[in-house]
Image (tube, grey):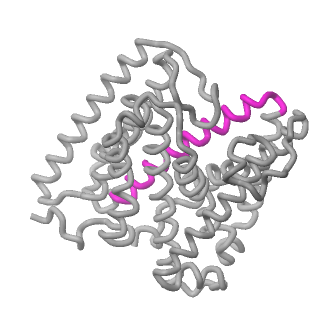
């Protein structure tokens, strides 16, 4: 029975690294939330220290991981610089136009773009980990339906229950909410049906091929659990943010580091000092994460100093910056500060096609 032989399992890096940094985050996040239900359930408050860890050190930091696959890689930038330049220019112009129409319109567009990105990341991991599965078209459809159902049904629940949530994606009112029992009933039926079909399919594969794809099934299970409990079961900002950010941000940073380190060691591409510091040894992960956190702290400091003024104690170097309140200046400033996020969301649709350097 080849249930767990590493030569079969389609790891990206290795069994240990993938399990710790890509596969386990949603389960560990759910464990933390379930151990402290009073703090996480129906709570709209988040301690500042916890906010710094989740938002600054994971959520915002992971966005800058894209730099190592694009702008920090001289060979990649040389080959694709028209795309890498055009996307941020397009995102900024679109952002200014949207914000000029109303702040909530800008945040709403960015929120739905972020949702699409989060959903697609789970699909991407599922596809990478299913590359050695039996290539039966029906089974590929079931896998695809499963990962999209795991993410879209909780979003439908969020949108159509018509009840207040103690959390949002970016700002209050960024999602268009309504009430529809019919949508929820149909969605619930599809949700349960897909789960049953997926389990039957995996049991059949396990019996007939005597193999069980551990990482793919952990990705699917982790997606179902983190999105269900983060959005449907718990109605708390801490619970949603913990499950959402940890399940998305840590695996993304791990994917970038694993892939770019493999690329550094197996290609003859130009190796800059930054790439040598980051990928030449396993200790380079400290440099990698440290640089991402530095960028994230700087960005959030600018947000806090110029716009929010909510965590001046955390961002003291930026506390003396003037708060911008004029609409015309905000229309120019906010899309600029959000540019790392919007560029990350759009650019990732182009740079994460399954390639040999990713899947090995």
Q: Main secondary structure of the magenta part?
A: helix
| The magenta stretch spans residue 30 | no
Q: Quadrant of residue 235?
A: top left
Residue at image coords 25%, 40%: 198
Residue extending furthest toward the bottom: 268
Image quarter of residue 299: bottom right
Left or right: where does residue 29 sit relative to residue 54?
left
- As drawn, is 211 to the left or to the right of 18? left
Q: Is residue 205 above or below residue 153?
A: below
Which residue is at a point 79% across and 51% down the rendered structure image? 319
- Residue ID at (47%, 62%): 354
Q: Is residue 212 left or right of residue 115?
A: left
Q: Quadrant of residue 108?
A: top right
Can residue 101 be seen here? The reply is yes
Q: Quadrant of the N terminus?
A: bottom left
Q: Is residue 4 left or right of residue 77?
A: left
In the rendering, at what x and y percent does residue 352 appear?
Answer: 53, 60
As drawn, 283 above or below 245: below
Q: Position of residue 46 (x, y in %)?
A: 53, 39
Q: Position of residue 104 (x, y in %)?
A: 72, 29
Q: Quadrant of the C terminus?
A: bottom left
Q: Nearer the viewer, residue 110 or 38?
A: 38
Residue placed at 25% from the left, 56% from the top? 134
Q: Position of residue 140 (x, y in %)?
A: 32, 47
The answer to whether any part of residue 90 appears in the image is no
Q: How many marks overall?
A: 0
Which residues make up the magenta segment? Answer: 100-129
Query: Looking at the image, which is closer to me, 280 or 238?
Result: 238
């Amino acid at each position: 029975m080849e249930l767990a032989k590493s030569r079969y399992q389609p790891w990206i890096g290795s069994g240990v690294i993938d399990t710790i940094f890509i596969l386990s985050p949603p389960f560990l996040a759910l464990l933390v939330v379930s151990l402290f239900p009073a703090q996480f359930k129906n709570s709209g408050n988040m301690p500042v220290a916890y906010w710094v860890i989740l938002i600054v050190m994971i959520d915002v930091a992971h966005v800058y991981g894209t730099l190592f696959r694009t702008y920090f890689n001289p060979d990649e930038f040389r080959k694709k610089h028209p795309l890498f330049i055009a996307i941020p220019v397009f995102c900024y112009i679109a952002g200014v136009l949207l914000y000029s129409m109303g702040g909530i319109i800008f945040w709403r567009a960015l929120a739905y773009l972020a949702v699409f990105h989060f959903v697609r990341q789970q699909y991407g991991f599922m596809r990478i980990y299913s590359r050695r599965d039996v290539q039966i078209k029906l089974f590929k459809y079931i896998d695809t339906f499963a990962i999209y159902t795991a993410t879209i049904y909780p979003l439908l629940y969020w949108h159509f229950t018509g009840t207040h949530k103690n959390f949002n994606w970016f700002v209050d009112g960024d999602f268009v909410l309504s009430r529809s029992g019919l949508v929820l009933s149909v969605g619930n039926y599809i949700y349960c049906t897909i789960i049953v079909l997926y389990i039957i399919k995996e049991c059949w594969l396990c019996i007939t091929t005597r193999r069980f794809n551990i990482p793919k099934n952990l990705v699917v299970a982790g997606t179902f659990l983190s999105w269900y409990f983060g959005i449907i079961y718990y109605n708390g900002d801490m619970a949603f943010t913990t499950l959402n950010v940890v399940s998305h941000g840590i695996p993304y940073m791990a994917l970038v580091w694993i892939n770019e380190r493999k690329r550094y060691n197996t290609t003859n591409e130009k190796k800059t000092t930054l790439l040598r510091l980051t990928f030449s040894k396993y200790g380079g992960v400290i440099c990698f994460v440290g640089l991402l956190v530095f960028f994230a702290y700087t960005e959030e400091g600018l947000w806090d100093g110029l716009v929010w003024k909510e965590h001046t104690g955390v961002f003291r170097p930026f506390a003396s910056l003037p708060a911008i309140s004029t609409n015309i200046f905000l229309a120019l400033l906010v899309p600029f500060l959000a540019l790392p996020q919007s560029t990350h969301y759009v650019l990732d649709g182009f740079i994460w096609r399954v390639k040999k350097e990713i899947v090995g």
